[in-house]
Image (tube, rainbow, N blue to C red):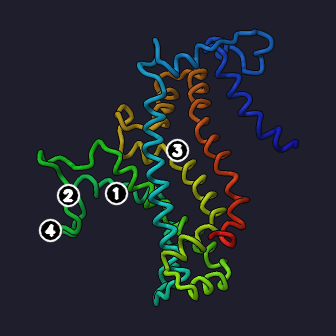
């Protein structure tokens, strides 16, 4: 209880700051709200609808973040689950080597991958005069995916894939072999076993990975700043919050924007939390 209370103090301060005026916050801390009584909803009105300081509200950036994170979760978890099943239950001669490569990819810093990926989407890859991956351009000669969500989708999915494969592989090798053998005796193919036996038993891991990927992509600013300009129509909500923090330096607006931005991740977390318990027995009872 004490640890929970101590952990909640900064969140409480952020919440109180979001309801105070910037002038009140400038001369007294948030804990003085009970004394000065300077509480207002102007910060939330400004963040949600725009106003004198903000040309637009936060809604377009929330939509952008959802458009970025949902395809990354869907595609990333699907590919990771299929790869993990192949490494766990298919007879792959070099499966040990592949797992070692997956583990080794965990130590590659994200920052080291951004420049090569940015080059890939702008001018392609080449070894001297030999083009390995040619530049993808449109009819005007400009990068094909510039000003789109594609670089963000690809980068997030690729960077999250090694961890997802590793965790799902560990979950799938724990599936009782008797269930898989019984399905094979009944004539089930690998796609059927994957979909009806193994995948339901791995729902707790899938739910945990889904929550992790959602939060990681939703809270990302580094990758978004690399591939998408801050004022772009494709910028996520973190770029909007960065603008509130850097350009305006309005503590109350930043606090209000932060609270609006965390509502969706909280809803996702509580919505997916129930799958932890359901996934424990779903595989054995699936028909």
Q: What element carries label 2?
A: loop
Q: Which of the two labelled residues, at mark 3 and mark 1, occupies the earlier sequence position?
A: 1
Q: Earlier in the sequence, mark 3 or mark 2?
A: 2
Residue at x 67%, y 85% (from the top left corner)? 178
Foreground of the two, 126 or 71: 71
Q: Check disc 2: other Cα within 10 Å, few if <14, some if 14-19, many if 20+.
A: some
SS category of the residue bearing label 1: helix
Residue that label 2 marks: 135
SS for callout 4: loop
- Point out the frontmost of discs 3 and 2: 3
Which residue has dot 3 on it? 218
**Above/below status of 280 relative to 181:** above
Return the disc, 2 or 4, that comes first in the chain's sequence: 4
Task: Look at 55% across and 21% down and name the residue there.
Answer: 250
Disc nearer the start of the sequence (1/4):
1
Q: Marks 3 and 4: CB-CB under 8 Å? A: no
Point out the tag, 2 or 1, that comes first from the N-terminus. 1
Q: Closer to the camera: disc 1 or disc 4?
A: 1
Viewer-nearest of discs 3 and 4: 3
Residue 129's label in the rendered image is: 4
Q: Position of residue 185 (x, y in %)?
A: 58, 88
Taking depth in this image into account, of 47 and 183 the one nearest to the observer is 183
Residue at 59% across / 59% down in the picture? Answer: 209
């Amino acid at each position: 209880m004490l640890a929970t209370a101590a952990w909640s103090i900064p969140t409480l301060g952020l919440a109180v700051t979001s309801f105070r005026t910037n002038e009140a916050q400038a001369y007294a801390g948030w804990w003085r709200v009970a004394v000065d009584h300077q509480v207002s909803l102007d910060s939330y009105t400004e963040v949600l609808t725009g106003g004198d300081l903000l040309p637009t509200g936060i809604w377009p950036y929330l939509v952008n973040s959802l458009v970025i994170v949902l395809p990354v979760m869907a595609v990333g978890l699907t590919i990771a689950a299929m790869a993990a099943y192949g490494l766990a239950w298919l007879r792959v001669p070099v499966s040990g080597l592949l797992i070692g490569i997956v583990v080794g990819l965990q130590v590659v810093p994200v920052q080291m991958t951004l420049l090569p990926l940015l080059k890939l989407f702008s001018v392609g890859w080449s070894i001297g005069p030999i083009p390995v991956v040619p530049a993808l351009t449109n009819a005007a000669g400009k990068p094909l995916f510039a000003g789109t969500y594609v670089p963000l989708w690809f980068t997030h999915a690729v960077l999250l894939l090694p961890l997802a494969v590793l965790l799902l592989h560990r979950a799938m090798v724990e599936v009782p072999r008797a269930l898989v053998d019984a399905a094979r005796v009944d004539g089930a193919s690998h796609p059927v076993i994957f979909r009806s036996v193994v995948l339901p038993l791995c729902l707790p891991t899938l739910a945990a990975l889904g929550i992790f990927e959602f939060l990681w992509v939703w809270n990302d600013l580094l990758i978004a700043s690399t591939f998408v300009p801050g004022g772009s129509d494709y910028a996520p909500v973190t770029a909007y919050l960065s603008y509130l923090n850097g350009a305006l330096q309005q503590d109350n607006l930043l606090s209000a924007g932060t609270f609006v931005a965390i509502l969706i991740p909280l809803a996702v977390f509580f919505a997916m939390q129930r799958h932890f318990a359901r996934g424990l027995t779903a595989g054995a009872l699936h028909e």
